[in-house]
Image: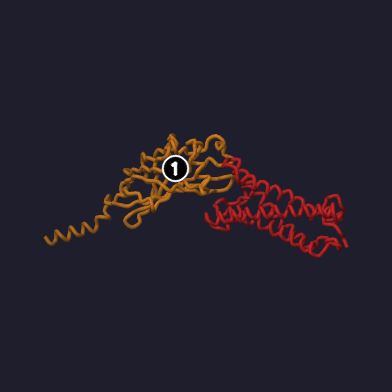
Amino acid sequence: MKNHYTATAKSLHWVMAVLIIGLLALGFYMQDLPLSPEKLKLYSWHKWAGVTAFLLVLVRLAWRAGHRPPPLPAGMPKPLQLAAHGGHLALYGLMLAMPLSGWLMSSAKGFQTVWFGLLPIPDLLAKDKALGDLLQNVHATLAVLFVLILVGHVAAALKHHFIDRDDILTRMLPARPTEN
Amino acid sequence: MKHALSTLALLAALSPLSAGAVEYNQVLPAKSSVAFTYQQMGVAVDGQFRKFSGQLSFDPAKPTAARVSFDVELASVDTGAPEGDAEVAGKPWFNTAAFPVARFVSSGVKAIGGNRYEVAGKLTIKGRTQDVIVPATFTAQGTGGVFEGAFTLRRADFSIGEGSWAKFDIVANDVRLKFRIAASGK
């Protein structure tokens, strides 16, 4: 059985890894800044990057639907296999829910999202302060959850590499053989 | 006598329609609004002022004699976000501690056809005064009337947003002001 990811899947994985870690770090950093031109700029960048990440995850889901990822190691215990699948499902769920909640939060707070300052994303919600505050909590809570699951994702990959000594980590690295 | 009485009654019935009989002079704040829109990195953001007052005298039959002065309490600003409200009350923006009120005082009114008018006047914000021309329409509604209009001011003309905010790359220079002023007649 083939045991590698396509070059496209690898590219999407690593581009999104950088984007998502950057988005999370920026999100936690910018929220406590005092209001300044810098802060408004960072918020705009965060929103632009968030829209980009949302589009990329759609591409990724479409690609994955047509390209089955390589299977988990045969010797892997059933509960751990379930945990791996559950973890990946949660990551995909969060990759969708994070930008969606951010977009809805922006709408409810009355600050439309305009991709790169050029392409207005429609406001699905009317301005509503209470709803905006609620969605802000949702967005922040999902972000904390995202960090926890990402830590688990990285820890699992490192465990596979250093403890189980299988190819789970290396098969996602660019150097390994790929197919398209 | 009977004839005289009926003439009087007829006159009384007609008087609201006769020229110069209605003067609009009481601003009704509860039915009025002063809103604004500005661009923030390409995003249009709406805000408003919650407290304002005005004196006016406007007779549709004699528009050139109309006068208006209008005060906006700058600390009543609603920028759409609480931290924005606190920020624009501060020194770099309105400096409401020193300049609590923005004031418009008309100097002349021109009728430009239909129910449209041009109100020339002086707008003073933050100790700086600029000549502005405010286009407005007037619509009679019941016993009162509504003035509506919009104009664009440049915040830099009034030093609104100094220091790190002075550049226009984040918050644009142009601010579109939209007003709806309801007045009752007398």
Image quarter (top left, top right, bottom left or bottom right) of the C terminus of chain A: bottom right
Q: Quadrant of residue A58?
A: bottom right
Task: Write the residue at 66% across / 53% down.
Answer: A144
* Secondary structure of residue under mark 1: helix
Give x and y (percent) for residue B51: 41, 47
Chain on which label 1 sits: B
Q: Which chain is orange?
A: B
Q: In the image shown, does A27 or B103 lie closer to the viewer? A: A27
Chain A, chosen colour in render:
red
Is A13 rendered above or below residue B92? below
Residue drawn at (77%, 64%) of the image: A82
User: Does the image show residue A86?
Assistant: yes
Residue behind mark 1: B74
Q: Residue at x 55, y 42 (%)?
A: B172
Q: How is the image coloured?
A: by chain
- Relative image position of residue B146 (x, y in whole percent): 38, 52
